[in-house]
Amino acid sequence: MASAEQVLVRAVVETTSGTFVTPSATNAMLLINDGFDSYNEQEQQKIGFLDGKLSPEVVIAGASFLKHSVVFGAIGGGIAGGAPQTDAYLLAAGLAKTIAAGRVEYTIAPSPGANKSLSFESYLAGLKYSGKGCMGTLDLSVQVNQVGKCSFGGLAIEQTAPVAAVIPADSFVGWRTPVPGSPTRSSRISLAASGGVTYSAGTLSGGATFLWSSYQLTGGQSVDKSPWCGGFGLDINKANPTVKITVLLTPAEAVAMEARYKAGTGISIGFSHNLSATGAVVPGETIVVHHPNAVITSLKNTGKFNGQFVAEIDAVPNPSSPGLTDGTRLVYL
């Protein structure tokens, strides 16, 4: 009997959304043992009949969807300028991908009717679940002394009913071990007024670098279930991303941040993870995130450290100009 800890997931981007693509051994995902879930979620209706008795309600089964949740490391795929091994999950969260020289860029830009989706096979405790048309949410979290993580939580259409299956012995060539935010494998946060921290061709410029303890990006994607008589599907109909950071501010910096908060003028944020000890880009590992105009929704001083304020900042990433999709840019170098 297989253990509940024996889990293997294969996932691949679909050519046509909702058309199952059989994943191969090369599509095996090296996941973190945290937050994994795979089970059926069914629509149901309860009906009570007037039968002269106090009979219990009858449960009528409706459409069934597969829940699919995974957690993987926030790190590149080991090839400079290449997409991460988890590219399928980023695309299935409504991110648009652009391949450029020396980098791959993603922006949160769902497009109903044109969103990418993935097919997967998840092996869990001796069972195999197969899903197609999978789309979901994507969150990124990096904290001091903890490895950077991406969390995906999605819904899928069941391809086949769960079956008993032996877990394959797939290999994981080229996968990188995620690293923590720390002084030795440094992550950096730069802040400035809106537009002050700029991004160009894989490089962040401007702003001041702050000591930090937490960076969290919540994609805020909304997956819409669309059942119809004769068929049903899934799509991402919107995304409301938020970003939360915890940084050290001097009193003067805290005053400036308070003024921006009250005026609603926003700030610009640049975040880099998986840098070398000298702060240099590590090809195939480094991730850069840029928010050109994040409007602060909450500003709290959670304590003091060496005479500085520990500021907890919540913000909504807006684009640099109305109509653009650069409010959150995720770059793999």
Image (tube, rainbow, N blue to C red):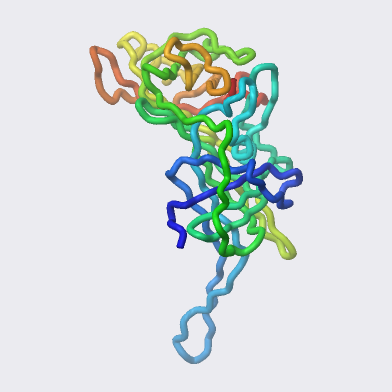
Of the pair 132 and 282, the residue shown nearer to us: 282
Would you place residue 254 above or below residue 123 in this image?
above
Q: Is residue 329 visible?
A: no
Quadrant containing the C terminus in the rendered view: top right
Identity of the residue drawn at 55% across and 12% down: 204
Tell me if 189 is positioned left or right of 152 in this view.
left
Of the pair 169 and 115, the residue shown nearer to us: 169
Q: Residue furthest bottom?
A: 52
Among the 4 quarters of the image, the one containing residue 240: top right
Tell me if 201 is positioned left or right of 182 in this view.
right
Tell me if 76 is positioned left or right of 96 in this view.
left
Would you place residue 36 above or below residue 85 in this image?
below
Identity of the residue drawn at 54% across and 76% down: 47
Identity of the residue drawn at 30% across and 11% down: 251
Coordinates of residue 211 in the picture (x, y in percent): 36, 16
Of the pair 85 and 88, the residue shown nearer to us: 85
Would you place residue 54 above or below residue 237 in this image?
below
Quadrant containing the N terminus in the rendered view: bottom left
Identity of the residue drawn at 66% across and 55% down: 226
Q: Can residue 204 be seen in this view?
A: yes
Among the 4 quarters of the image, the one containing residue 307: top left
Coordinates of residue 146 in the picture (x, y in percent): 38, 30
Coordinates of residue 27 in the picture (x, y in percent): 63, 42
Would you place residue 90 above or below residue 298 in this image?
below
- Count of numbered circles in the view: 0
Coordinates of residue 201 in the picture (x, y in percent): 64, 14
Tell me if 88 is positioned left or right of 32 in this view.
right
